[in-house]
Image (tube, rainbow, N blue to C red):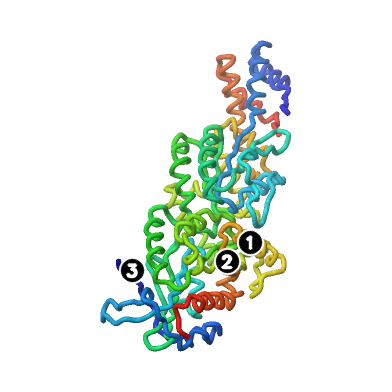
């Protein structure tokens, strides 16, 4: 089996940790697990990657989240149509040949036909990932596709431990607030809490559910913290 | 509660124009017209949970016909689908969203299959800033398309367009989208029409919360209905959403129905005479 990951950027973990300090905990780490090895298609060199993949429905802001972490519009995004068709990734060096990698996968829920391909792709990537950021939207109520994808992908406790539920678009939850503000209003916070409870009931996640906004940046540092926590708990890294 | 309209003045006016209608025919005509006037139109509002079906109904009809929740799904029980609004009893079918939970989907499929044949109008609601339409696609292709081909009035309503990005650009003062937002709404309109393989005119972009394009929605709906149903539907619409055009179309549709019924009963065409006297009467 061969899974392909394109990389758009190769940098150093400092690129990220200057923006989100939690990532600095990964600095100097050695990635040490056979399933995290990648071979370069062109020169055959081997590198090790603690991969954090972003999965979820199309239009839920996976690419925007990666962009916000990185601080640049590096992943193509669209307000209207789906545009990610393969795994696009950003590599950040931790130690020689070892990387922390943000991987952006295509979104499901666009059409039945594509979903079959993409779910297969998700499955393939799961084995090679240290953490799976399952992005859902706080301002939506229909989670049927998310639920069925989650059930299909994560069947045992070991795989569920890798999942971080990321509740995006908290800036758009009712009652809508059109003034650009980095924090939600208190009425919104109430609805965000209700939403968290609902998601907890529906998915019964192992790790914390992180509400955030990739538009305003609200609570992204907590998301970074949770991602780093899952990676360090996995035992796949020597820090 | 059914209403009975007194047609005596109408028959007298017809008589003065030389169309004398025997008593037994008069009561036949009255019954038929009253039946049509008392018809309870059934509007089916479909869509995933959270697209704003309830808000849409409330905004169009101007009364709180459906409960609204910001977070949780509130239209859960398939049995509660018929909500009566007003004594006229226009029936709204605000069905639970496609999805919400995998187990319930089969239940909904059956429900939808039973509902479609009895509906006069179908509105399929999408959320403007969503682009995951797989479940809509499934239901649309399996359940809706066969019925539209039979000539059923059907619209895709893209609701909450005020939330299409960049949603902070919405011009609240003039109640319209900002520049980049307007472009994205146009793009969405085109993408959705293409996706559902429908003409652009059958896809409407509105915002129930901001009361944006509601008049246009009502115009399109009235235009699509058969002549004897235009008036009964328009009467249930909030006054602020009735345009002059919609009123004109509904009235002329109703008069055409009157002509048909009278001509049918007395077996003589009365078009000319009815056109002459119709301005003397109001149906509102």
Q: Secondary structure at mark 2?
A: strand
The image quadrant that residue A42 belongs to is: bottom left
In this picture, residue A160 sits left or right of residue A186: left
Chain of the residue displaying label 2: A
Tell me the residue that label 2 is attached to. A167
Q: Residue at x 68, y 67 (%)?
A: A189
Numbered label tally: 3
Q: Secondary structure at mark 1?
A: helix
Is A238 drawn above or below residue A181 in the view shown? below
Tell me the crowding category of disc 3: few under 14, some 14 to 19, or many 20 or more residues within 10 angstroms, Cα based. few
The reply to whether the C-beta atoms of the residues labelled 3 and 2 are less than 8 Å apart is no
Residue A205 or residue A195, whichever sits in front = A205
The image quadrant that residue B30 belongs to is: top right
Give the label on residue A3, or none.
3
Chain of the residue displaying label 1: A
Which of disc 2 and disc 3 is earlier in sequence?
3
Residue B219 or residue A235, whichever sits in front = A235
Q: Residue at x 58, y 78 (%)?
A: A221
């Amino acid at each position: 089996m061969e899974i392909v990951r394109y990389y758009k950027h190769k940098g150093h973990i400092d690129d990220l940790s200057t923006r989100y300090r939690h990532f600095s905990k990964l600095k100097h780490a050695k990635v040490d697990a056979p399933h995290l090895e990648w071979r370069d298609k062109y020169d055959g060199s081997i590198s090790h990657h603690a991969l954090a993949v972003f999965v979820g429905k199309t239009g839920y802001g996976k690419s925007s989240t990666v962009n916000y972490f990185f601080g640049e519009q590096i992943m193509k995004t669209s307000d209207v149509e789906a545009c990610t068709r393969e795994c696009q990734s950003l590599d950040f060096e931790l130690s020689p040949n070892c990387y922390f990698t943000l991987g952006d996968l295509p979104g499901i829920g666009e059409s039945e036909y594509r979903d079959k391909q993409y779910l297969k792709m998700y499955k393939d990537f799961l084995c090679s990932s240290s953490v799976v950021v399952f992005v859902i939207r706080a301002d939506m109520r229909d989670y049927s596709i998310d639920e069925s994808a989650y059930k299909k992908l994560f069947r045992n406790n070991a795989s569920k431990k890798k999942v971080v539920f990321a509740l995006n678009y908290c800036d758009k939850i009712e009652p809508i607030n059109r003034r650009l503000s980095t924090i939600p209003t208190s009425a919104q916070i109430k609805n965000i809490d209700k939403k968290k409870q609902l998601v907890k009931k529906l998915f019964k996640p192992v790790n914390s559910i992180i509400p955030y906004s990739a538009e305003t940046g609200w609570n992204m540092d907590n998301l970074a913290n949770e991602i780093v926590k899952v990676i360090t708990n996995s035992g796949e890294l020597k820090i | 509660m059914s209403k009975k309209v007194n047609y005596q003045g109408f028959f007298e006016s017809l008589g003065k124009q030389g169309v004398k209608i025997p008593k037994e025919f008069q009561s036949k005509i009255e019954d038929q017209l009253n039946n049509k006037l008392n018809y309870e139109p059934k509007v089916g509002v479909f869509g995933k949970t959270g697209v704003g079906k309830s808000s849409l109904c409330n905004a169009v009809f101007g009364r709180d016909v459906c409960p609204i929740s910001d977070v949780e799904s509130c239209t859960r029980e398939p049995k509660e689908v018929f909500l009566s609004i007003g004594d006229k009893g226009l029936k709204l079918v605000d069905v639970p969203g496609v999805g919400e939970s995998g187990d319930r989907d089969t239940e909904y499929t059956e429900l939808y299959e039973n509902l479609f044949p009895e509906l006069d109008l179908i509105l399929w609601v999408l959320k403007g800033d969503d682009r995951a339409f797989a479940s809509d696609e499934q239901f649309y292709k399996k359940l809706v398309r066969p019925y539209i081909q039979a000539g059923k009035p059907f619209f895709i309503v893209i609701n909450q367009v005020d939330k299409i990005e960049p949603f902070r650009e919405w011009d609240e003062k003039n109640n319209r989208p900002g520049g980049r937002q307007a472009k994205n709404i146009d793009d969405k309109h085109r993408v959705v029409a293409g996706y559902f393989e429908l003409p652009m005119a059958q896809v409407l972009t509105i915002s129930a919360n901001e009361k944006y394009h509601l008049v246009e929605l009502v115009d399109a709906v009235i235009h699509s209905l058969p002549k004897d149903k235009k008036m009964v539907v328009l009467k249930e619409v909030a006054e602020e959403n009735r345009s002059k055009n919609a009123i004109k179309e509904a009235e002329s549709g109703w008069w055409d129905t009157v002509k048909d019924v009278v001509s049918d009963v007395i077996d003589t065409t009365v078009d000319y005479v009815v056109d002459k006297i119709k301005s003397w009467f109001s149906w509102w």
